[in-house]
Image: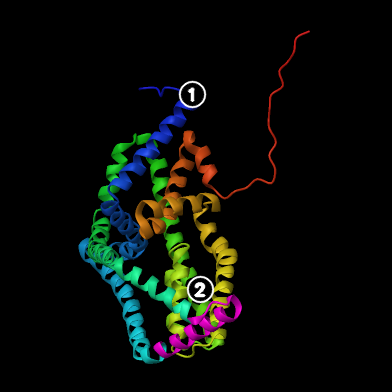
Amino acid sequence: MIRPIPLPFYAKLCFVLITLICFAFIFCLGKDIITPVLMAFLFAVLLLPVFTFLNGKIKIPRHIAAAICVLLFAAFIVGILVFISYQVKNIASDFDIIKKNINAFIAEIHKFINENFHVSIGEQKKYLDTVTKDSVKNSNASIGSFIVSLSDLLLDFTIIPIYTFLFLIYKDHFILFLAKLVNSEDHMKLKGILSQIKVSINNYIVSLILEMIIVSILTGLGLYIVGVKYFILLGLITGILNLIPYIGIAIAGVITLFASLTGTGETSIILSILIVNVIVQLIDNNLLVPLIINSKVEINAFVSIIGIIVGGAAAGISGMFLAIPLLAILKIIFDRIESLEPWGYLMGNHVPRKFKWRMRRMKTEN
């Protein structure tokens, strides 16, 4: 039996950092391929209980059970998209009202700037015309980038269900592969890691869905109170976009402000919508996220923010969405490996009340 070679701390630190850098480099290099695979892996873990029930309890063949799981999940997503598109169609029918209220709102803004900053309406319109012309000149590149992003999104929507289907079919195959990578005496540790990863990912995704539902209800209720017409649709859109860290709620706010113009162009309704969004975000960030999300993945806020920023820089919105579950998987692995346990503790949300150094006293000889 080969004995492990004891290494000093700086050597272990170098190996850990080099390994993380290599994984990060590989991910950045192949993000267009790796990102859909990771998304499919998360969805496969979420659907695994349904697949186990169909295949194990009801004795439905593996391929058919996997296909049913994927079709049910796809039907759920398509149902939400159909509902949103139906509501958006109603908003589009009010386009003339929106245009009229936008003009009224812009007129109020011009008047406010003229009265408080002493800038004439003519100068304001001249500045807006200049900005509009510059935007039109740069629109060709933006349109091209949008088309590329849209094509990538359609490709992901096509290939992610296929990957999810294959993950469910070859689940045992992948587990056996991992078992062949480690010694037989470490199989119990590997089994514990895989079980904890499954539980953590399931808890995280279920918590996200629960958070989305609560945010949708709170936003819809607030918009209903202030008198916004399509409060159900806008609440649902806010809840869905809230899944995207940081930028999602900003996009939802812009959509809500635009849709509110189907009713009136008064400044008071705009301020009311902003107040509703701020209140909902305060409840979400200070109550829902700590109780629902952080308690499930056990990742502290500092590591979560850094992970989301790095994920966004590496793979955009998909990277921001994948950051937390990937960090949770890393923490589970670190916690189960003795040499990496301090790194797992660093990522955790357990904060000691106080810390005392434990130092041995050296005996002095007289």
In the image, residue 32 sits, relative to residue 82, either above or below, namely above
Does 213 appear in magenta? Answer: no
Magenta-highlighted residues: 99-121
Amino acid type for the residue under numbered disc 1: Pro
Is 55 left or right of 121, judged from the image as shown? left
Asked where in the image residue 324 lies, by quadrant, the reply is: bottom left
Q: Quadrant of the N terminus?
A: top left
Q: Position of residue 100 (x, y in %)?
A: 42, 90
Which disc number belongs to residue 215? 2
Q: Residue 339's x, y, as percent?
A: 48, 33
Identify the residue position indicated by label 1 in the image: 8
Q: Secondary structure at mark 1?
A: loop
Height in image: 151 above or below 193? below
Marked residue nearer the N-terminal end (2 or 1)? 1
Q: Residue at x 54, y 48 (%)?
A: 348
Q: Residue at x 32, y 47 (%)?
A: 28
* Residue 50, horizontal then vertical, whole percent: 34, 65
Residue 196 in sight:
no
The local secondary structure at tag 2 comes to helix
Residue 8 in picture, x, y percent from top left? 48, 23
